[in-house]
Image (cartoon, rainbow, N blue to C red):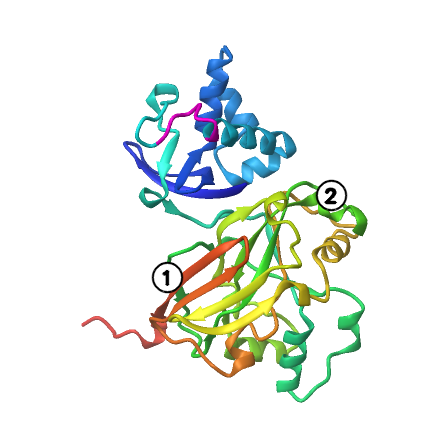
Amino acid sequence: MKLVTFRIQTPLGWFDRAGALAGDVVLDLNAAYAWYLHQQGDPQPQAVANVLLPSTVLGLLQQGNRAMGQARLMLEFYKMGELGDLANPVLGLNNARLLFAHAEVTLQAPLPNPTSFRDFYAFEEHVRNGFARRKEPIPDPWFELPVYYKGNPNSVIGPNVEAPWPSYTKRLDYELELGCIIGKAGMNIPENQATDYIAGYCIINDVSARDIQRQEMLCRLGPAKAKDFATIIGPWLVTPDEVGDAYDLRMTADINGERWSDGHSGTIHWRFEQMIAHASKDEWLQPGDIFGSGTVGRGCGLELDRWIQPGDTMTLAIDKLGELTNKVGNPKVALAEMPVAP
């Protein structure tokens, strides 16, 4: 199942809704479930739907397996023709639309408000290349535990929007990563049970201000401002049953249609199961937490000594997860550089 967050305009304004993607059709899961409950004779179908199958992807994840099961049921109802089609749709409560053409909605980040973002450093080739640029070996502790930094969960953006270029950097970079979304709460999770906590996967473009990152890391802290302005995820959250083996996925990045990066998830050193076990030691993981794999080997401009420019188009792709495309914005003007009004 592919879960999306889609934006639609209504007489009351713009709303973001949780949906499931079926080909070129987006199914509004909450509206479909309210219709289903009404058909079953429930006296308060919308109120019950809002609890059991909420209208946001985060709310859905927080409701756990029951909500995921109802989402799959609604998707099956659509595939069986029970909800009609775009030409002859079934209308929900108060004539609410249940089906939308992919082209008529705007996809947001599938999880626009994650509860946290942990970005790991899991691909040895990427780590080795980075330390080689500093003429240093990989530190021994990297082989002993899966290290990570915590990013800004409030700066997540989605596909087909402009990637911001902060005023304080002159060297922006893309980073090709595999993302994992946590689907239920847990602490001290054994590695052999960790897959039970994975709700799905997505593509991550961990946009980085490399000059600022270098300064921060020289102080043995961060990265912070080098990363916290934008993390791009999408285009959808794909459930594990549809992904299959998460360590058998080709990962590519094209800049303006030219292939810059070509890697494979199977080259990862620290697997998500190990990351989950480590991060959950005496600490609660929550539904809606995002884990980033870190950059696949040669999956960024830093390793290639090639740099994206304003106006460039970045297209990151991972097998079974789709494509994540964003245009690079123009550098913002720092306040100190802005002209003074006459």
For the residue marked with disc 1, what is the amino acid? Glu
The magenta stretch spans residue 8: no
| Structural crowding at the residue carrying mark 2, measured as other residues with C-alpha within 10 Å and reported as few (<14), some (14–19) or many (≥20) | some
Residue 169 vertical placement versus 251 (above, below): below
Marks counted in the figure total 2
Please tell me whether residue 307 is drawn above or below residue 72 in the rendered image: below
Q: Position of residue 192 (x, y in %)?
A: 80, 49
SS state under label 1: loop
On screen, residue 257 versus residue 226, left or right, reads left
Task: Tell me which secondary structure the magenta stretch mostly adopts.
Answer: loop
In which quarter of the view is residue 342 placed? bottom left
Decide if residue 333 is on the left or right side of residue 117: left
- What kind of element bears circle 2? loop
Which residue is at a point 61% across and 73% down the rendered structure image?
297
For disc 2, the marked residue is: 186
Q: Which residues are magenta?
A: 79-85
Q: Earlier in the sequence, mark 1 or mark 2?
A: 1
Q: Report the residue at 56% width, 32% height from top.
A: 72
Label 1 to label 2, Cα distance in Å?
35 Å
Looking at this view, name the residue that lies furthest to the front. Answer: 80
Instruction: Determine which of the numbered discs, if any, sits on residue 309 in the image.
Output: none
Residue 84 on the magenta span: yes
| Residue 294 in the image, given as x and y percentages of width and height | 62, 65
Density class for disc 1 (Cα within 10 Å; few <14, some 14-19, many ≥20) is some
**Residue farthest toward the left in the current orientation of the protein:** 342
Disc 2 residue type? Gly
* Rendered image quadrant of residue 84: top left
Q: Is residue 302 visible?
A: yes
Measured as percent of width and height from the top left, residue 107 is found at 40, 47
For mark 1, what is the residue? 162
Horizontal relation, residue 192 to residue 266: left or right: right
